[in-house]
Image (cartoon, rainbow, N blue to C red):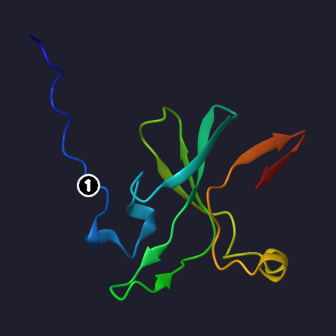
Amino acid sequence: MNHPRKPPEQRLFDPDTFEDETTWKTLNTHDPGIFKDSGSYYTFSTDAMYRENDRPLFRGGIQVRRSKDLTDWEWVGHAFDGVPEQAKDWTGAVGLWAPDVIKLHDAYLLY
């Protein structure tokens, strides 16, 4: 009986790069929404980083990454610098979760 090759070991979290999300590639890309525009793919994803005492350490907003081939990803930045004040006032939210993006005419809508 033939079996597929065992996949290479991939760490889901790297404590050595914890403080620098620009090095994460696809690590810590939780609940990503993905779309294609102008020949590139984009992910918008959740992340909450935690300290040893489990107190959330939010770096700010929704993470954004880009890829031409869905395999090699580069860090773009954050969509928001934390929870927008209007959303925080209305919901009391302290974090953002499971984002998705659509393009409507010339505008991108993140929800």
| Residue found 18% across the figure and 21% down from its top | 4
> Image quadrant of residue 92?
bottom right
> Foreground residue, 73 or 6?
6
Q: Residue furthest left?
A: 1
Residue 108 lies left or right of residue 78; in this view the side is right
* Quadrant that contains the C terminus: bottom right
Residue 88 lies left or right of residue 104; in this view the side is left
> How many labels, in total?
1
Amino acid type of the residue tagged 1 in the rendering: Arg
Q: Position of residue 82 (x, y in %)?
A: 66, 76
| Residue found 39% across the figure and 59% down from its top | 24
Residue holding disc 1: 11
* Quadrant that contains the N terminus: top left
Q: Residue furthest top?
A: 1
Helix, strand or loop at mark 1: loop
Q: Position of residue 22 (x, y in %)?
A: 45, 64
Tell me if mark 1 has few (under 14), some (14-19) or many (20+) residues whose alpha carbon lies within 10 angstroms of its own. Answer: few
Q: Position of residue 39 (x, y in %)?
A: 64, 31
| Residue found 20% across the figure and 34% down from its top | 7
Q: Residue furthest right?
A: 105
